[in-house]
Image: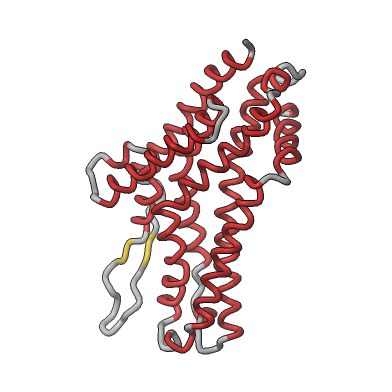
């Protein structure tokens, strides 16, 4: 465990000034800021919108982009950036020759990539809530403060995180095996487009294809029947562990184990 912690800390110091790290911070900030500006400018057209629907419009704009394309492409970039330092400096053999178990070195890089994705999605939750509530202060007509969406938003982004694990595992392995960015990027982009097509067309077996999972995670927003007569606010639930989630977790575990043996053999040659 000590070796893992040391390796994990080393990954942070090596990547803290790279675009891979800062993309996980700046992407949620910039997207939420742009949406904040849009709602601020168009506030007069939204003053009669119920608080919950305001939140769904505000958060849903980003969630739709995330599920369709943004999350898979972010994962591809983060997975490559974590390993690009070793490729660029040709330090794989040196890294695996350290007096730390090879599993600790490999697992630290692997879970650091997971951490960056988790951190990015957590920031999306924080910035969405922060900018939404700021709008209610600057524009009192936008009654964001009259509905608490924090629990729903947290569950939904955690669903996205679980849906991303299979993709992240595959892209992490590809970025280990290929030195250049074009191969893992090209494979990931083609698979992302394919996954989007399969999920959007409701193919019965789309859940078996990990690149479909982010878009399928959007189905976690299920609108139930309205409650009492005259009610206009839907009840929304998040079904966390669906078939696609279990497939994503299974792929993550299988690729992690397989990747260790593949990369270990290549790195000690």
Indicate the position of residue 195 as horizontal and vertical percent values: 34, 43
Q: Which residue is drawn at 46% across and 63% down?
A: 62
Does 241 sit above or below residue 174? below
Q: Which residue is drawn at 71% across and 22% down?
A: 95
Indicate the position of residue 252 as horizontal and vertical percent values: 47, 33
Left or right of 232? Residue 65 is: right
Name the image quarter holding residue 232: bottom left
Q: Residue at x 40, y 60 (%)?
A: 64
Q: Work out which quarter of the rendered image holds the C terminus and state it.
A: top right
Q: Which residue lies furthest to the top in this view?
A: 269
Q: Which residue is drawn at 54% across and 70% down?
A: 34
Left or right of 220? Residue 94 is: right
Indicate the position of residue 199 as horizontal and vertical percent values: 29, 48
Does 9 sit above or below residue 42? above
Q: Work out which quarter of the rendered image holds the N terminus and state it.
A: top right
Colour pattern of the rendering: secondary structure
Indicate the position of residue 146 as horizontal and vertical percent values: 51, 81
Given residues 181 and 124, the one toward you in this image is: 181
Does 204 sit above or below residue 33? above
């Amino acid at each position: 465990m000590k070796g893992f912690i040391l390796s994990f800390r080393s990954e942070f110091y090596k990547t803290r000034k790279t675009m891979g790290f800062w993309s996980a911070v700046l992407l949620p900030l910039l997207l939420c800021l742009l949406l904040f500006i849009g709602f601020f400018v168009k506030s007069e057209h939204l003053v009669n919108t119920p608080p919950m629907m305001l939140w769904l419009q505000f958060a849903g704009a980003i969630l739709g982009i995330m599920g369709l394309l943004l999350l898979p492409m972010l994962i591809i970039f983060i997975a490559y950036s974590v390993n690009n330092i070793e490729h660029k400096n040709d330090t794989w053999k040196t890294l695996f020759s350290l007096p730390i178990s090879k599993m600790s070195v490999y697992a630290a890089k692997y879970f650091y990539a997971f951490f960056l994705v988790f951190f990015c999605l957590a920031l999306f939750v924080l910035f969405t809530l922060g900018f939404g509530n700021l709008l209610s202060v600057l524009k009192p007509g936008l009654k964001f403060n009259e509905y608490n969406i924090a629990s729903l938003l947290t569950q939904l982004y955690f669903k996205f995180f679980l849906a991303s694990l299979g993709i992240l595992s595959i892209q992490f392995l590809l970025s280990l095996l290929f030195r250049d960015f074009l191969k893992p990027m090209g494979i990931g982009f083609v698979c992302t487009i394919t996954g989007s097509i399969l999920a959007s067309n409701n193919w019965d077996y789309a859940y078996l294809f990990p690149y479909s999972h982010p878009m399928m995670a959007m189905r976690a927003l299920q609108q139930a029947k309205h409650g009492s007569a005259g009610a206009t606010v839907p009840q929304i639930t998040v079904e966390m562990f669906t078939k696609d989630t279990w497939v994503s977790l299974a792929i993550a575990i299988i690729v992690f184990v397989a990747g260790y043996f593949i990369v270990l053999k290549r790195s000690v040659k």
